[in-house]
Amino acid sequence: MRIDIISVLPELMESPFKASILKRAVDKGVVEVYFHQLRDFGLGKHRQVDDEPYGGSAGMVMMIEPLDNCISELKAQRDYDEVIYLTPDGETLNQKIANTLSLKNNLIFLCGHYKGIDQRVREMHITKEISIGDYVLTGGELAACVLADSIIRLVPGVLNDEQSALTDSFQDNLLSPPIYTRPFEYKGLKVPEILLSGNSRKIEDWLHEQAVKITEEKRPDILR
Ligand code: ADE
């Protein structure tokens, strides 16, 4: 998988790909992540990328020309499955969207700034708009990292068996059951006996029951 991320602040996004699982995915060559500084496509000597909105509302708007030039240059080099704009008015990210995107080959992420992008960029290039939640960030960069992380860990070959995504919260519209490790007893708090029973069938049933119970308590909205 290849992800091209367009932004005026690419430096904000470097560290997440330099540690742990995302780093391993990049080092293994399972994913390639490229950052594109939008200012390299900016206009004039000041490399302008934003301008005042028509109609006179507050804030600045990301201009069409630098964005079109940057996206078109990428599209001329390969086919992209999706051109994704990170924006608070997009579809809210969930595990199903991450699963679907993890099967794609080439993705562009566009990080918005200021008041957003000229509407015509959406019409020309954007195929998907994603929000990471109902709150407003200073820009799309942190959202792009969240989206990339949620996708990359699902790409085949990234997680090993121990880290398997199959038992993740949300994967079956259920939250994860409780988990424990040694010691068996700590300050009077014991691990449920069933987990030491060695009966894998019973353990599996118990874990499923717990997952349903926790989901009913915490997130009844995701239960089918
Ligand atoms: N840009 C600003 N806020 C955002 C959000 N909640 N999700 C995605 N992109 C954003």
Image (cartoon, rainbow, N blue to C red):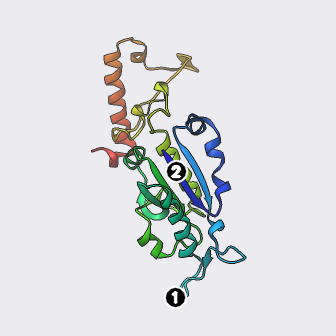
Quadrant in which residue 213 is drawn:
top left
Q: Position of residue 119 (x, y in %)?
A: 46, 75
Task: Please provide percent x and percent y for residue 133.
Answer: 47, 57
Mark 1 / mark 2, whichever is N-terminal:
2
Q: Nearer the viewer, residue 95 or 210?
A: 95
Q: Quadrant of residue 176?
A: top left
Determine the image quadrant of residue 70: bottom right
How many numbered circles are shown? 2
Q: Is residue 40 left or right of residue 75?
A: right
Image quadrant holding the C terminus, namely top left
Q: CA distance from mark 1 to mark 2?
A: 35 Å
Q: Residue at x 34, y 46 (%)?
A: 222
- Residue 157 drawn above or below residue 152: above
Q: Which mark is residue 55?
A: 1
Q: Secondary structure at mark 1?
A: loop
**In the image, what residue type sits under mark 1?**
Gly
**Hey, what amino acid is under mark 2?**
Ile
What residue is shown at x 68% (from left), y 78% (from top)?
44
Q: Residues within 10 Å of mark 2 (few under 14, many from 20)?
A: many
Front one among 14 and 138: 14
Q: Secondary structure at mark 2?
A: strand
Q: Residues within 10 Å of mark 1 (few under 14, many from 20)?
A: few
Nearer-the-camera pick, 216 or 92: 92
Which numbered dot is residue 3?
2
The residue positioned 50% from the left and 24% from the top of the image is 180
Q: Is mark 2 within 8 Å of ligand 1?
A: no
Q: Position of residue 167 (x, y in %)?
A: 40, 32
Check the image and name the residue furthest to the top: 198
